Amino acid sequence: MINVRRIGHATLETPDLDRQIEYYTQIFGLALTGREKGRAFLSTRLGQQTVVLEQGDQPRCTKIAFEADPNDDLTALSRALSDKSITAKRRSDATPAISDVLAFSDPKGTEIEIFTSAKMAPFDAAPSGFTPLKLGHLAFNVADIQKVVSFYTDVLGFRISDWRSDFFAFLRCGPDHHTINFASHGAHEKMHHIAFELKDWAEIQRACDFLGRHNYHLVWGPGRHVIGHNVFIYHKNPDGQIMELYCELDQMKQESLGYFEPRPWHQDQPQNPKVWPTDTLGSYWGGRAPPGFGD
Ligand SMILES: [Fe+2]
């Protein structure tokens, strides 16, 4: 089994590469670290590559890159995957950050790229409206949630943080409550949203004001989720994809202890991974999600 440690970047296809580059750099506070025909590479201003944009027919997430332990050997990992009847290929199609990846497909057809070392871009201190600290998680709607969750736990080493009934799963690969989540709302499969961490509430407020000033209006939030307990806001990028900005996500700092760091907004003390009821609120004190938000 691979034990991924961190999400690296998402590869997003877009029908309008220039428009998405402008959004991610001028509005969303990322830095452009490279561009070639039909592709662009974006990092946080702190230097971690987080988004790769590729010219394509429609907005969609085609690949997710995860960082494994630096001592892992990609050749050995490839053999371990082969033992599970998963065909992986080694690739060296360089991005500015990563030159060596092991690539294979997950059950919903998204390509998984495993890497063990990444170069950071230089710190970009130019002023921006707000400053995402990192890519935090991706959320997907999937048709067969049990199959996808089993793949992420058995092949990639994720742990289940919470379920909401049997149709919404939150998985972690490090201290963060979730690095990926899956919901099954029917047969359709797509990325539901992409989430970046901001430093704190003050930065969320800065983001609200900055986004509003540039005509990017919130589609939900601010609020505090119950599952994961992060403070959140959501808006849509020019491709119509939902972007989440959040802070104060639950943390399990010691995996062997099995509970999340106590916080005054928790429902249980300690807050352990569990199955939450179907009618659990999406927002603890904010408004409800707008109709169709989960679709
Ligand atoms: Fe989220």
Image (cartoon, helix red, strand yellow):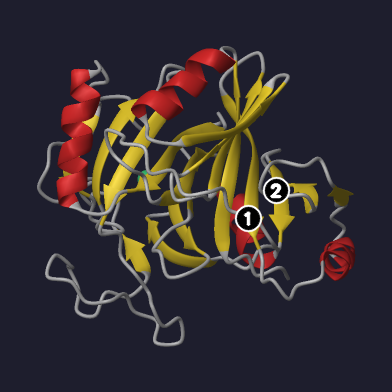
Residue found 65% across the figure and 70% down from its top:
3
Farthest-out residue, bottom: 257
Q: Which mark is residue 66?
A: 1
Say what secondary structure mark 2 lies in. strand
The image position of residue 44, as x and y in percent, is 46, 44
**Which one is nearer the viewer's eye here, 290 or 241?**
241
Residue found 42% across the figure and 19% down from its top:
240
16 relative position to 76: left or right: left
Residue type marked 2: Ile
**Residue where numbered disc 2 is placed:** 112
Residue type marked 1: Phe
- Quadrant, the N terminus: bottom right
Residue found 31% across the figure and 34% down from its top:
128
The image position of residue 269, as x and y in percent, is 19, 79
The answer to whether residue 260 is visible is yes
Location of residue 268 by image quarter: bottom left
